[in-house]
Image (cartoon, grey):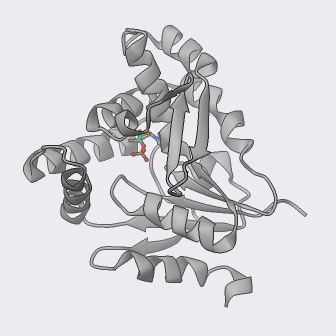
Amino acid sequence: PAIPVLTIDGPSGSGKGTVSRLVARALGWHYLDSGALYRAVGVAAGWAGLDLDDAGALVRCAFDTDIAFREAADGELRVLVNGHDATDELRTETAGAAASAIAAIPEVRAALRDRQRAFRQPPGLVADGRDMGTVIFPDARFKVFLTASAEERAERRYKQLKDKGVSVTLAGLLREILARDARDASRAVAPLRPAEDAVRIDTTGLPIAAVVERVLALLPARR
Ligand code: C5P
């Protein structure tokens, strides 16, 4: 039988990253942070001084960039881009915006497709992103779509960044989140939308642990 996949899609700040990691750990499954791949290509393009309008160069960059995930001693997932630890740089809004811009290019998405599918390894995979359930793993056995109000998502990002000592304003973050949502939802290829067979969970006002419980409850073995 096919290796089981649980896809967790949703907009930025919906909690999908944290929830996906915790669910993967609880299940002992592999974890794919697909957004990190787009962010990594965006950051590598920046390092190379590429123009975000030069689709051809960006596609080559998507094929050529070496991206590796490594679990640090503290259990945190570090991302190596062309051999450099770029974990912190990947988390910035600049990297998110670059990722969102290059993610709208169909050939860039195609360049990353097989790399994402290669994460499907026994005993199973939790895949986090925008099009995991619709495009990359349409045959996934379990699909979840997480949402939350834009205000709450901005507040979550604000807390995360403040804890890291990054100086941002809540209003600025809300603006960036709304702009990124609009771009992700309106692009022609793989727009952000729930798969028809996805279970939707609104996480507004829900603690992470409660979301994790609800997701785990979808898996028969856990019922
Ligand atoms: O999830 P994260 O915020 O890290 O994703 C960064 C950007 O990468 C998103 O705004 C989106 O444009 C793009 N992305 C995508 N498809 C995915 C994951 C991320 O287009 N599966």
* Residue 97 location, quadrant: top left
In the figure, is residue 165 to the left or right of 86?
left
Looking at the image, which residue is at 58% across and 13% down?
60
**Where in the figure is residue 55, as x and y percent of width and height?**
47, 13
Q: Is residue 107 above or below residue 16?
A: above
Q: Is residue 107 above or below residue 97?
A: above
Relative depth, front residue between 135 and 74: 74
Residue 124 vs residue 167, the one in the foreground: 167
Q: Residue at x 36, y 62 (%)?
A: 14
> How far across and down, in percent of the image, does residue 156 sit?
25, 61
Left or right of residue 46, residue 74 in this image: right
Q: Residue furthest front?
A: 73
Assign the C terminus to one quadrant of the image.
bottom right
Viewer can see residue 139: yes
Taking the image as four quarters, which one is ligand 1 found in?
top left
The residue furthest bottom is: 223
Picture coordinates of residue 45 (x, y %)? 44, 17
Residue 111 position by quadrant: top right
114 lies left or right of 50:
right
**Left or right, residue 159 beside residue 62:** left
> Residue, x 35% and y 73% (percent of image)?
203
